[in-house]
Amino acid sequence: MTQFEITILGCGSATPTTLHNPSAQYVTVNDKAFLIDCGEGTQLQMRKYKASFGKLLSVFISHLHGDHVFGLPGLISTLNLLGRNGDFYVYAHEEAEYLLNPTLNFFNKIIRYNVIHEKIEKNCLSVLFENNSIKISTFPLKHRMPTNGFLVEEKEKPLRIKKEMIEFYQIPISEIKNIKNGADFICRDGSIVSNNRLTFPAGKPRKYAYCADTAFYPDIIPHIKEVDVLYHEATFMEQDIARAHETYHSTAKEAAEIAKMANVGKLVIGHFSSRYKDLTPLLDEAKEVFENTELAFEGMTISL
Amino acid sequence: MTQFEITILGCGSATPTTLHNPSAQYVTVNDKAFLIDCGEGTQLQMRKYKASFGKLLSVFISHLHGDHVFGLPGLISTLNLLGRNGDFYVYAHEEAEYLLNPTLNFFNKIIRYNVIHEKIEKNCLSVLFENNSIKISTFPLKHRMPTNGFLVEEKEKPLRIKKEMIEFYQIPISEIKNIKNGADFICRDGSIVSNNRLTFPAGKPRKYAYCADTAFYPDIIPHIKEVDVLYHEATFMEQDIARAHETYHSTAKEAAEIAKMANVGKLVIGHFSSRYKDLTPLLDEAKEVFENTELAFEGMTISL
């Protein structure tokens, strides 16, 4: 199966600690890589966890709080020093230009590649990136400022042809594509071989959703329905739910409720408040609602 | 003796590696703390090495290459989140505003303390900070863009009075200050006790100089003459001297030559190019010229 992997580079919240870095994730699908969020120190974490700079196509910024974006100037400078020449896309709200403009106009006067700011519309559903095999789309979350979640999904895959059948029925190459798309095969003598004799079913397209930062917000359910893995912020414990509501963050239990309602495969919680040294109580609170929950940690690799 | 200590938070050069962070140092003198340079991840390194955020008065930025300044937005945000209310001074060239303006106007809309940008004049000698006991001044280095070195020095200290003499001669409190400043004491019977019977000599004022980034530049000698410790950049080995000259950096040997000419107490070299995994050859090359040389490393504490 092709690679679909997420490495957690940072899963702390606004105040960095010795335990957690600010938000960033490195997502690899079919040998292409993307960053989701880019808190301060992201490039250092990429080095630490051996995440390739060369494979990196683009970065998706959920919102413009510093702990999700202050790693961008350093990353852009380093890509330049490393001799990048392919385009680099930054998907972010319009105001990201306040950080990008000085980065590009003053701090990297000679830049050898294009940094293209693709603006994410606020409060909109939209497809941001698409190629033959994957699609990355965005949906609004509920936070103190406009904030977007991201859905990374494989496209419907073609059927997988049984190699031995190609020889057995002398199937010409010109027919392969049709069969992979579900067609039956008509032999020279006019007899019909039904498609299900010739193919294996395609694997289910895999899906990963990222939701940080956000208050408890069931409106996102249709967008993250039945994803294999959901990363959802869980800044607070239940005892601090008043603070969670005040700051438009979620508790671990609320994250689990979203996971349950969306019937996801696995929930990974993160964006932990620096007030908790031991995260076990957050995990316990989530697991009471949704058993298949894990705590994010720096260096964690999630394979779908 | 009062504390005069430097903690190296980062001593790598432009491209961060798993071995080194970008430039930053935390300087503590008499319970007041200052940062010199603030590369990406400085606040994370402060956490790691338990450098107090509360004691931090100001930051001195040598020049506006990203690896010396990209940690500033995150630091300013974190000081805000930690509830700082005292003024915070950023000493930097005028163009630092390209980074400070978005940090203050967009990324910290509600900021509860004053960030005051004190402009460092280019190519000038000047005193930037002064209180009763210390003075921080700046002098120009030679780099691809305007760059400044910093000299942190104790002021001339008063003589230290011998406590037993206060009792012996019944010296009134009103006279103590005069004696510390060198006055003799006149007893009630008119007899004179000479100052050197009453006091210990004051310790020699300690001095620390920071020179990064810079080409080999003997013009700085008068400003760093006989400092206790000189931190001088040594980006390259002698075999790469052509590259050093091209990029306005120094070799380890050149740093040592400066140390020797300035007759400093100790040389600490840093700002190492990411091309060297083993730094021993740089140390060896420096030691051939100036024996009392040490390699900087993250977490190193230099006590003066």
Image (cartoon, coloured by chain):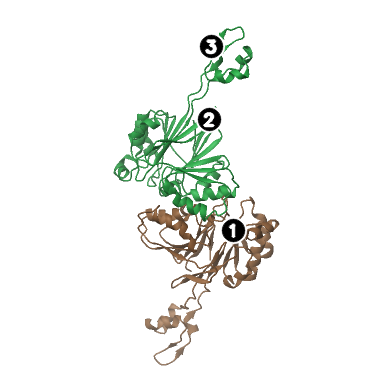
Chain colours: A brown, B green
Q: Amino acid at mark 2?
A: Asn
Q: CA distance from mark 1 to mark 2?
A: 48 Å
Determine which of the numbered discs, if any, sits on residue B194 in the image: 3
Q: Residues within 10 Å of mark 2 (few under 14, many from 20)?
A: few
Q: Position of residue B23 (x, y in %)?
A: 45, 44
In the picture, the disc for residue A270 is 1
Q: Residue furthest bottom?
A: A190
Badge 1 density bin: few <14, some 14–19, many ≥20, Cα 10 Å: many
Residue B132's disc is 2
Question: Which residue is more in the foreground, A44 or B102?
Answer: B102
What's under tag 3, amino acid-wise? Ser
In the depicted view, which residue is nearer to us: A104 or B5? A104
Find numbered disc 3 in the image and state the secondary structure of the residue it sits on: loop
Q: Residue A209, how many percent across, how many down? A: 55, 66
Viewer-side residue, B117 vs B58: B117
Q: How many marks?
A: 3
Image point 66% across, 66% down: which residue?
Answer: A257
